[in-house]
Amino acid sequence: MTERRPRPSVDAALAMIEDAVTPLGIESIEAGDALGRISAGPAIAELDVPRFMASAMDGFAVRSADVLAATRENPVDLLLGGALPAGGEAGSLLAGHAVPISTGARLPQGADAILVREFGEVVGACLRVRRPIEAFRNVRARGEDMARGGELIGAGHLITPDTIGALAACGIERIAVRRMPRLVLVSSGSELAADRAGLSDQAKAIDCNAPMILAAARSLGLPVRFLGRMADTPEAVGQMLDTAFVPGDADILISTGGVSVGDFDLVRSGLEARGVRIHFHGVQMRPGKPLLFAELPDGRPYFGLPGNPVAALVAFRFFVMAAVRRMLGLAREVGAPVSADAEPREGTTLFLRGRRVPDPEGRVRIDTSLDQRSHVLSSVVHADHWLRVSPDAPRFLAYPKLPLL
Ligand SMILES: Nc1nc2c(c(=O)[nH]1)N[C@H]1C(S)=C(S)[C@@H](COP(=O)(O)OP(=O)(O)OC[C@H]3O[C@@H](n4cnc5c(N)ncnc54)[C@H](O)[C@@H]3O)O[C@H]1N2
Ligand code: MOO
């Protein structure tokens, strides 16, 4: 067997991934298509929002100076003009006049305050006002939401539906985003069948890692291609690696299985035969201890995820995602400090399936009584968080179960 270096800690392994991976290129796309993408630079408002001084309520537009002296006993009567709907031609408001106005309508020239409809007393052709209305009452100022030339978002912002709405409002039609990393996936193991129909042989098991990792990638909008299942023979592994390595449509290569110390764990030797540089093979953690991270001669990262399903999932969730984040120009994910009932383990970081439970003091507490063995996937289904338990401080960090950008 090839000589092995000491296994890095989780943080050291993450740092090695971040060092080896570089951010991907930038592309300009339609803002309306940018959901789930990461901005590559600042987006600058093209328009003021609101574009003009507008009414914030349905009511009456007035000149505040006209009603300064209004009191209950000595009201001021303002002559009512024609109603002003949103999008209507605003014109101007003469002294001593008022106009009914809708929410969002541009204030007529001269008007500077709105009396809300509910408090308006209409007497014949007049609006009777019984107290002063201060300037700018119920008025939206031009550009108070977003000012033309101002920065709506900077680089490294995840574009969510609210971002898309704000981009549209301030007239930004195209946006520069990072290219999304494209993944290819292979599963290894002669025992694996695609589905129930392939289980004729008693020793076969369904390949659940492939659909799981594909789904995890797709949940983030990452393009991913499944190359298939490879048998545990040097020829099959070699052939699959040669296919996976063809440059062109993948930024990150991933396999599951075949990375521990068994006679049929052939991924590492297959990689080494192709001049791949192994950055680490094994991490001081559970599950996922045999995780392998390597770099192809052309610089692309390769992840050999361990075969046990929960180990594969944890390795994807925390380590492949570290590479994805780096490619997107994002910083390392930060967990939330929580309290938990778990026992830290000397020299090893644990990733435990956790459930949030009420704490008497209202803090977040994570229960880890679920089955924590690495072949048991059903307990992950019933978990709502990953709990990272470190040998050093911070002891307990919670992460959302689904990887997030
Ligand atoms: N002597 C040792 N044995 C094992 C060690 C060790 O350190 N010394 N490590 C254990 C740990 S930890 C893990 S994790 C596994 C990882 O092994 P491999 O990555 O080589 O994976 P395989 O041997 O191919 O499979 C392990 C296990 O997972 C099942 N599997 C594999 N792929 C899939 C898939 N796509 N879908 C569903 N299940 C899959 C496979 O059938 C095995 O049950 O090694 C331990 N052993
Ligand atoms: O660490 Mo293995 O990754 O226990 O399943």
Image (spheres, rainbow, N blue to C red):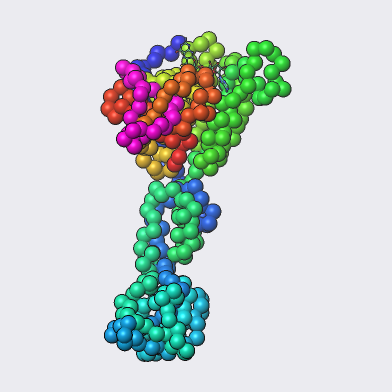
Instruction: Looking at the picture, tell me which residue is in the foreground, 147 or 272.
Output: 147
* Residue range highlighted in magenta: 337-364
Instruction: Write the residue at 38% across / 69% down.
Output: 143
Q: Is residue 147 above or below residue 250?
A: below
Q: Quadrant of the C terminus?
A: top left
Instruction: Looking at the picture, tell me which residue is in the foreground, 183 or 87.
Output: 87
Say left or right for 235 vs 57: right
* Residue furthest out toward the front: 73
Residue 192 position in % (x across, y down):
62, 19
Residue 141 position in % (x across, y down):
36, 71
Say left or right for 400 vs 210: left
Q: Is residue 349 magenta?
A: yes
Q: Is residue 109 above or below residue 308?
A: below
Quick check: can you spot residue 320?
Answer: no
Quick check: can you spot residue 262?
Answer: yes
Say left or right for 45 vs 86: left
Instruction: Write the residue at 55% across / 39% down.
Output: 218
